[in-house]
Image (spheres, rainbow, N blue to C red):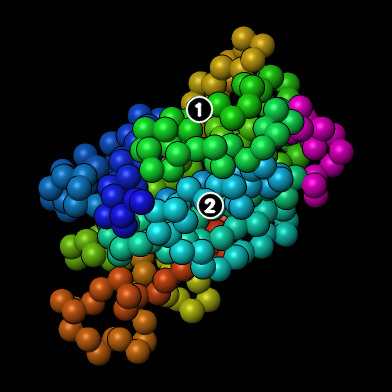
Amino acid sequence: MTTPSQKLKTLDAVLDGLMSRYRERVPDVSGLIDALVDENVIRTADDIENDHIAFRTMGLPSLGIQSFEKIFLHYGYEKREPYDFKEKKLNAWWYSPPKPHYPRIFVSELRVRDLSDEAQHIIYQYTDSVVFDPVDTLDLDDARAVDQFLHQPLWQIPALDDYLRLLNESEYAAWVIYNRYYLNHFTISVHNLKPGYNTIQDFVAFLERRGFKLNTSGGTIKISPDEGLLQASTVAQLIDAEFADGQTHRIAGSYVEFAERRVLPEFRHLPADQIGREHRRDGFEAGNADKIFESTFTSQTGK
Ligand code: OOG
Ligand code: NI
């Protein structure tokens, strides 16, 4: 039997593995940490509160949310609310962590069956090799096995032509066919930073002053209708990707997000030093998310 504390140790190792690959792939992460240290906002990267991390997957029988979520449900994450993105043909769920200092998780999946026959056919060429749910044979208590699983190819490296044809119909599909389970983004919580940086507006001003390229779809700052959740993100960093046919092409990798969660109206009377995560707006917002997805789309990365 694995005890809850052993599971949390495994979770720590899995999250560390995800973050270290992510830092290598996304130079903006180190750039941001350096800029925050330089302005005395944080002392080290450990001072950053990670609001949430996000993954993308193909909505197919042996893949998709119902497969991927098993990993984090095992570590004590709880499945919360679903979201539906009609235009982009995506489903998503968010998961709350076993302890408040862990990041929330946002997982989305492409409704592959809603794509054109041509796009479906391209996707199946790769995913047909996945005939059973790969998470079912994974030892979730073995951090190294899970780390390896999250960073290994689930199917063959795509041909550039397939990638480009998918890109034309669904930028999300193209992203997943190449990037698979690589961490899509981590999210800096801004509300606990020092004054001058602790609102999304001030933080975005800092990012712009420092020359970070931000997602402008629907406006730089995305605001939930209840005004409790305010988000912004960088545009994805481009990576030189190698394709099956030996060709290389610059494609979207991962990005960084920023979130301000405001104190809920019923807790606004509390003194600042008593405010915890449970007193702030939780969850996600479909209208914000819809635009944040576009951080990896050519309309944003090509600006
Ligand atoms: C996720 C976009 C949505 C949020 O916080 O609402 C999101 C993605 O790009 O895969 O991150
Ligand atoms: Ni996000």
In the structure shown, which secondary structural element does the residue marked by tag 2 occupy?
helix
The crowding category of the residue bearing disc 2, from other C-alpha atoms within 10 Å (few below 14, some 14 to 19, many at least 20), is many
Q: Residue 152 carries which label?
A: 1
The image shows residue 5 at horizontal and vertical percentages of: 27, 55
**Magenta-colored stretch includes residue 115:** yes
**Vertical placement of residue 291 versus 249, above or below:** below
Q: Earlier in the sequence, mark 1 or mark 2?
A: 2
Q: Main secondary structure of the magenta part?
A: helix
Label 1: which secondary element:
loop
- Residue displayed at 19% across by 52% down: 47
- Crowding at mark 1 (Cα within 10 Å: few <14, some 14-19, many 20+): few
**Is-magenta flag for residue 73?**
no
Q: In the rendered image, which residue does mark 2 sit on? A: 69
| Position of residue 213 measured from the top left corner of the image (x, y, whole percent) | 42, 42
Is residue 124 shown left or right of residue 53? right
**Between residues 85 and 100, which one lies in front from this camera angle?**
100
Residue contact between numbered discs 1 and 2, judged by CB atoms under 8 Å: no
x and y percent of residue 38 in the render? 15, 43
Q: Give the range drawn in magenta.
A: 113-125
* Quarter location, residue 194: bottom left
* Residue 171 in view here: no
Q: Specify the amino acid type for callout 1.
A: Gln
* In the image, residue 57 above or below residue 159: below
Q: Which of 3 and 198 is in front in this view?
A: 3
> Which residue corresponds to the image point at 76% horizontal and 40% vertical from the top-left?
169
Q: In which quarter of the image is the C terminus?
A: top right
